[in-house]
Image (cartoon, rainbow, N blue to C red):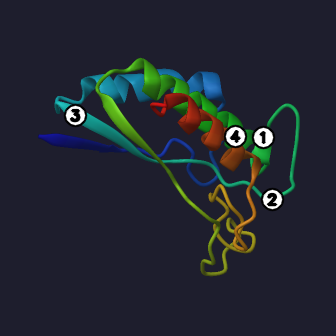
Amino acid sequence: MLGCIHAVYVRLGVAIRGENVKPPMEVVIKKEKAELQQFLAGGADALAGLHALPPVMWSEDYQTALIAMSARVFRRIPEVIGEHVWNFADFATAQAVHRPGGNHKGVFTRDRQPKAAAWLLRDLWKQSSPE
């Protein structure tokens, strides 16, 4: 049986620091009774070219830190068999105050240029692929 956990820890108007999101993710995953699990829809909006240290919402650094932290948690839990980053590329949405120019959760821009998170994912997936 394939169990599927769909959880989004960064919601509109809510910022969660990486160290605060780890325990909830691990608790949700470990409580799930399915034999195999996949965590879906993890990610954060990032405006291309926006950088900030420490990482702040909407920066590429925040998106990269959130994805890196998620990957560390997933790799510690043997029941997790896959991961899915939301989303491949930024895309248009209806006009709204919380969506400046569309959805920016992509690891690529709308014109398919890589954001910092794309390079992180490349490195993570190269490490975990059999050579």
Closer to the chain start, of discs 1 and 2, is 2
Q: Nearer the viewer, residue 5 or 71?
A: 71
Residue at coordinates 62% horizontally, 45% vertically from top-left? 14
Q: Where is residue 130 drawn, in percent x and y?
A: 45, 31
Q: What amino acid type is highlighted by mark number 3?
A: Leu
Q: Amino acid at mark 2?
A: Ala
Q: Which mark identifies residue 83?
A: none
Badge nearest the viewer, 1 or 3: 3
| Residues at discs 4 and 3 in contact (Cβ within 8 Å) | no
- Asked if residue 114 is positioned above or below residue 129 in the image, the reply reads below
Q: Which residue is mark 1?
A: 61
Say whether marks 1 and 2 touch (CB < 8 Å): no
Secondary structure found at label 4: helix
Mark 1 touches mark 4? (CB < 8 Å): yes
Q: Amino acid at mark 4?
A: Thr
Q: List the residue tagged with mark 3.
A: 36
Indicate the amino acid at tag 1. Answer: Asp
State the separation of the CA atoms marked 4 and 3.
26 Å
Mark earlier in primary sequence (1, 3): 3
Q: Quadrant of the N terminus?
A: top left
Task: Tell which residue pokes out farthest to the left in this image.
Answer: 1
Nearest to N terminus: mark 4 or mark 3 = 3
